[in-house]
Amino acid sequence: MRHGADLDSLDGRQQQQRFTCWHCGTELIWGNDFDMEDINDGEESDYDFYSTFTCPKCESYTEVFHKCQ
Ligand SMILES: [Zn+2]
């Protein structure tokens, strides 16, 4: 039985998280999600997708890899 928003947040991919820039602390802008299957041409990977973020202030670029579950 599901109740509340706690379980919904476990779905992962749709989860909206806020990341701040490692260098200047500005909130990063989410860019895209990429499927590892597309990148690796079907090869096995420890990660199933990754997301890209950019900093609007110092233009740092961040990739966050999501581990397979
Ligand atoms: Zn920054």
Image (tube, rainbow, N blue to C red):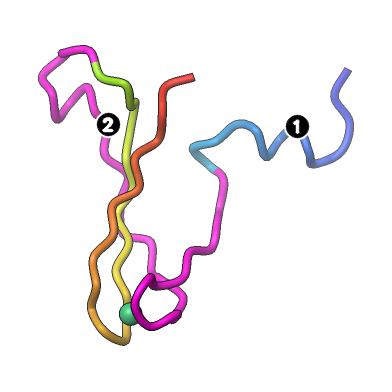
As measured in the structure, the alpha-carbon distance from the residue carrying label 1 to the one carrying label 2 is 23 Å
Residue 62: x and y in percent read 28, 60
Choose the circle earlier in sequence order: 1 or 2: 1
| Residue name at image x 14 percent, y 30 percent | 39
Residue 19: in magenta span: yes
Q: Is residue 38 positioned above or below 30 on the image?
A: above
**Where on the image, by quarter, is ligand 1?**
bottom left
Residues 11 and 67: in front is 67
Query: Crowding at label 1, few (<14), some or many (≥20) Cα neighbours within 10 Å?
Result: few
Looking at the image, which residue sits at the far bottom?
Answer: 57
Residue 29: x and y in percent read 38, 69
Q: Which residue is mark 2?
A: 35
Residue 42: x and y in percent read 16, 14
Question: What kind of element bears circle 1?
Answer: loop
Residue 10: in magenta span: no
Q: Quadrant of residue 45?
A: top left
Looking at the image, which residue sits at the far left?
Answer: 41
Q: Is residue 58 left or right of residue 12?
A: left
Q: Quadrant of residue 53?
A: bottom left
Q: Which residue is mark 1?
A: 7
Look at label 1 and name its amino acid: Leu
The residues colored magenta run 15-44
| Residue name at image x 85 percent, y 24 percent | 2
